[in-house]
Each structure stands twice: as C-alpha cells, then as structure tokens.
Amino acid sequence: MALIIDGNALAAEIRTEVSADVARLTTSTGIVPGLNLLLVGEDPASTVYVRNKSKDCEKVGIRSTIVRMAATATEEEVVEQVREWNNDPTVHGILVQLPIPKHINEHRVIRTIDPAKDVDGFHPENAGRLLIGLDGFIPCTPYGVLEMLKRYNIETSGKHAVVVGRSNIVGKPLAILLAQKRPQGNATVTICHTGTPNIAEHTRRADILISAVGVHGVITADHVKDGAVVIDVGINRITLPDGTTKLTGDVLFDEVSAKASAITPVPGGVGPMTRAMLLRNTVTAAERIGGR
Ligand SMILES: NC(=O)c1ccc[n+]([C@@H]2O[C@H](COP(=O)([O-])OP(=O)(O)OC[C@H]3O[C@@H](n4cnc5c(N)ncnc54)[C@H](OP(=O)(O)O)[C@@H]3O)[C@@H](O)[C@H]2O)c1
C-alpha cells in the first residue's frame, strides 16, 4: 500500500512559514504584502476560487482585494485595471482569474501584468525565465508539486519522470522544471498528450508519474510500474450511480495505490499545495519589490 502524500498537512506547514515571513517583512520594512484579484464575470467555480484565495491570504497576514467586473466588461477596462495595479506600490501580486470572457484577449491581459507582480507565473517573461532557469515566478501548481517532492524527500535526479498533459500552466512547466539541472530536477522527462499513441507504454517506465489531464480514470494500475511515485494533478467531478457527485483525480486511486510507493489523493493532494504556493509567490513578490 502506497504512502499517501498529505497535501493538506504540507500546505498548512507552508502557510505557517509564509505567515512568519509576512510578520518578519512587515516588522523590518513596514511592507504588508498585498494581492489583488480580478474576477471578470460570474462563473461559479471562479467565484469560489477567488474567494478561497482571498481567505487564504487573510490567514497569513497578506492583504487581499477582490475586484469584480461584469462579464460585459471591455478588454480596455480589464487592461486599464491591471495597469492601475501595476502602478500601485501597495499591490505586490496581481491575479486575473481565468478563464475570462471570450471577447477579451487573455494573452493581452496576462502580458499587461507587470512580470514582477505576476504571482501566477503566466506572463511570457516568467515562462521564459522558467525555461532558461532564471528566477521568476513558477506557476503555483508545478511549484506545489516540486514542494511535495522536496518535503517528502522524493529523489528526482537520475529518475525517469513522465508527465501526462502539456498545458502551459501545468504539464509543460512541470516537465521543464523536472528536467532542469536543479533541486527537484535532473530527471529524464517524457511528456505524453493526446498525440501519444500508447500512453501506458511510456507511463509504465516512470519512476515518477504525474498526471495533469482532467479525465477521470485516464491512469489505471496498468499504466503504473510497481513502486512508482504517482502525483495526480487532475480535478474532475464525476456523477456516482446514486446521482450524487464527487471530486476525483485522473488516477484510479484504489488500484494504483496498491502498486505505487507514494501517491497524492484528490482532494487533499496537489490542490491545497497550489493555493499555498500562491501565498509564497505573493510574499516573494513583496520581498523583491521591497528590496528594489
Ligand atoms: N490540483 C490543482 O491545483 C490543479 C491546478 C490546475 C489544474 N488542475 C487540474 O488538472 C487537470 C489539467 O489541467 P490543465 O489546466 O493542464 O488542463 P488542459 O489545459 O485541459 O490540459 C490538459 C492536457 O491533457 C492532455 N490530454 C487530454 N486528454 C488526454 C488523454 N486522454 N490522454 C493524454 N493526454 C490527454 C491534453 O492534450 P492536448 O494538449 O493534446 O490537448 C492537454 O495537454 C484538470 O483536471 C484541472 O482541473 C488542478
């Protein structure tokens, strides 16, 4: 039976550390880290995410402000709001909750964010920095996965990591980070996606298997080597035979945990880590801006 990697406990540990760093920063410089969140439209899931992120901030002493704009807001209005925050010295982190309504060019909005305040790590400058191994902001989910590997002393150097999924916010940055010559890196990395003919052929060779797909059951016991570490990034809502719904990952947890050496559950795995790393990135932004 695999070791269950406890994302809730790790996230609590990180919040405690962030909280201490906020107190230290505020005492030594007077700076109170501030995160401003922009929500465009009324998507119910996004509304919950933004509220949770703001509550997380409160717990650790980060000031947070949510600004809501109607779904009919123009691209110029959104860009103008971001520019205003870029120029506000009390705002250290800027987060535009995605997705935004289709009539607004998401890439332009992200590009407008000052890269020094881009705590989601989605700005092309931060993506480029990550690619060439410079300090910047690592997107929160890949960052959370690296922290899990680090805090559970899971060796990556010399191992074969297989990442399923190649999105710009999870799969791609994670694969690059694992391949970099750095702590929690130096792995040999394979990336699988919808263009990979036989995924199991690759995943079965993984010492560390990371699934970031968004399809429940895409990873079965047949996809996993005995003793592999399995990180499940996926979040899917499935309907049970009795009509109720349940959150699940990409991995068939029961059968895979019988084979793996360690595994993350859903919920309680990568999700809380993603939220915790946003707090870490916001404090890092405040520290860097404070030190300018
Ligand atoms: N735990 C967290 O904090 C957290 C954070 C972010 C996302 N998530 C979850 O993680 C999952 C992935 O998120 P994302 O934003 O990366 O999603 P995404 O943008 O939809 O990307 C999914 C990736 O999986 C690939 N894919 C889809 N079906 C596949 C299949 N059957 N076999 C192999 N590859 C397949 C896609 O390939 P193509 O490129 O060919 O389309 C794509 O690269 C979602 O469930 C999301 O909710 C969780």
Image (spheres, grey):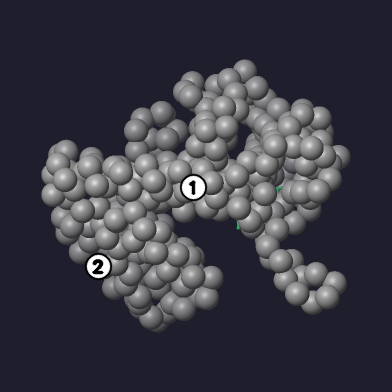
Task: Say whether marks 1 and 2 touch (CB < 8 Å).
Answer: no
**Res 46 seen here:** yes
Where's residue 258, x and y in %?
A: 82, 39
Give the number of callouts: 2
> Which amino acid type is shown beneath numbered disc 2?
Glu
Viewer-nearest of discs 1 and 2: 1
The one of 117 and 195 positioned closer to us in this rendering: 117
> Viewer-proximal residue, 102 or 51?
51
Question: Callout 2: helix, strand or loop?
Answer: helix
Specify the farthest residue to the top: 158
- Quarter of the picture containing the N terminus is top right
Q: Residues within 10 Å of mark 1 (few under 14, many from 20)?
A: many
Note whether 143 is above or below 103 in the view shown. above
- Residue at 60%, 28% (x, y): give it: 154
Q: Residue at x 16, y 38 (%)?
A: 291
Q: Amino acid at mark 1?
A: Ala
Residue 141 shows up from this direction: no
**Which residue bears the numbered disc 2?**
80
Residue 173, given in percent of the width and then of the height, sits at: 51, 40
Which of the two discs, 1 and 2, labels the residue nearer the N terminus?
1
51, 213: nearer the viewer: 51
Q: Which residue is denoted by mark 1 in the rendering?
A: 11
Mark carried by residue 47: none
Q: Is residue 33 above or below residue 25?
A: below
Q: Is residue 183 above or below residue 65?
A: above
Q: On the rendered structure, is 99 left or right of 24?
A: right
The local secondary structure at tag 1 comes to helix
Using the rendered view, name the quadrant where residue 60 is placed.
Answer: bottom left
| Separation (CA) of disc 1 from disc 2 | 34 Å
Which residue does the image show at 41% across and 48% down from the upper left? 15
Q: Quadrant of the C terminus?
A: top left
